[in-house]
Image: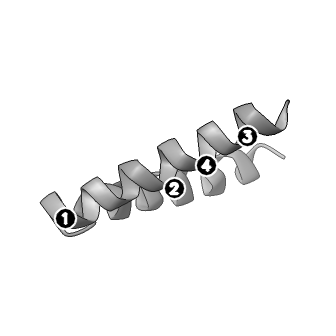
């Protein structure tokens, strides 16, 4: 991964978080964090 690509990805993620904060009060990010936690717990079961 090049530095330019990494900076683009960071900027895109930060822009999405900022948009979620301004428009939806971080409800989308909270939903995704909860689902990611459930997925990690599910995968840990199969380990």
- Identify the residue under disc 4: 10
- Identify the residue under disc 2: 38
- Identify the residue under disc 1: 22
Q: How far apart are the two marked residues, 1 and 2, measured between alpha carbons?
A: 26 Å
User: Toward which corner of the image does residue 6 lie, by quadrant?
Assistant: top right
Label drawn at residue 6: 3
> Is label 4 in a helix, a strand or a loop?
helix
Name the mark nearer the viewer: 2 or 4: 4
Tag 3 and tag 4, C-beta contact below 8 Å = yes
Q: How far apart are the two marked residues, 3 and 1, measured between alpha carbons?
A: 24 Å
**Side of 10 where 3 appears, left or right:** right
Tag 2 and tag 3, C-beta contact below 8 Å = no
Q: How far apart are the two marked residues, 2 and 3, measured between alpha carbons?
A: 28 Å
Tag 3 and tag 1, C-beta contact below 8 Å = no
Question: Which residue is painted at 43% across and 61% down in the image?
Answer: 34
Quarter that holds the N terminus? top right
- Mark 1 and mark 4 lie on one chain; the one further toward the N terminus is 4
Residue 2 location in percent, x, y? 85, 31
């Amino acid at each position: 991964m090049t530095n330019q690509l990494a900076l683009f990805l960071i900027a895109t993620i930060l822009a999405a978080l900022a948009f979620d904060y301004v428009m939806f009060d971080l409800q989308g990010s909270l939903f995704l964090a909860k689902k990611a936690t459930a997925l990690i717990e599910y995968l840990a079961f199969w380990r």
